[in-house]
Image (tube, grey):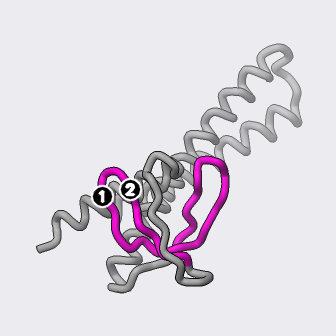
Amino acid sequence: MLRYIAMSLVSLAVVAVCLVVIVWLLRDGEFGGEAPLLLADAGRAIEDTVDLAREAQTGLELLAAQMSGAPQARDWTHIDGRIVRAVLVDANTREVTIRREADGRVFRVALTALSKADRDYVRAWLSRRELQP
C-alpha cells in the first residue's frame, strides 16, 4: 500500500518539476537550438510519470477493493479505445470476465484485447487471489 502511495507522490513531483522546466524554457528562451531537445526530454519524463501514475492507480484500486470486501467497478479500456465501467468477476491468464455496471451484462474478454493498465490490474488481482487461503 505504501509503495503505491509513494509512487503516486513521486509521480506528482516529477510532473511538477517537468512543468516548471517547460515554463522556464518557454519564458526565457535562452537555449536557442537546445530548447527543443530539452522540451523533448521533459515530454518523455511526463510520459514516464503518467505510466507510473497508472500503475499507482491500479494498486490503489486493488487496495480499495480488498479493504471494502466488495468488488469495485473500474474503467476497462479495450485496445481500440472503447471504455466500459465494470466489475471484475473472474480471470485467468488468458481472459477476464467482467460485469458491466450500467446494465449488469457479463462479458468475457481476451486479456490481449485490453490495455496494458488493465492487464496489469488482472495480473495483480490473480497474484492477490493466489495468496488468499
Residue closer to the observer: 117 or 88: 88
Residue annotated with mark 1: 92
Residue visible at 49% across and 52% down in the picture: 117
Residue visible at 34% across and 63% down in the picture: 91
> 102 above or below 42?
below
Q: Examine the structure image and report whether residue 92 is included in the region drawn in magenta.
A: yes
> 102 above or below 123?
below
User: In the structure shown, which secondary structural element does the residue marked by tag 2 occupy?
Assistant: strand
- The quarter of the image holding the N terminus is bottom left
The mark total stands at: 2
Residue visible at 41% across and 52% down in the picture: 120
> 99 above or below 35?
below
Over which residues does the magenta segment extend? 74-100
Residue visible at 41% across and 58% down in the picture: 121
Q: What crowding class fits label 1: few (fewer than 14 Cα within 10 Å), some (14-19), or many (20 or more)?
A: few
User: In the structure shown, which secondary structural element does the residue marked by tag 1 occupy?
Assistant: loop
**Relative image position of residue 19 (x, y in whole percent):** 72, 44
Q: Which mark is residue 95?
A: 2
Instruction: Evaluate whether residue 10 shows in this view.
Output: no
Amino acid type at image mark 2: Glu
Q: Are marks 2 and 1 in contact (CB under 8 Å)?
A: yes
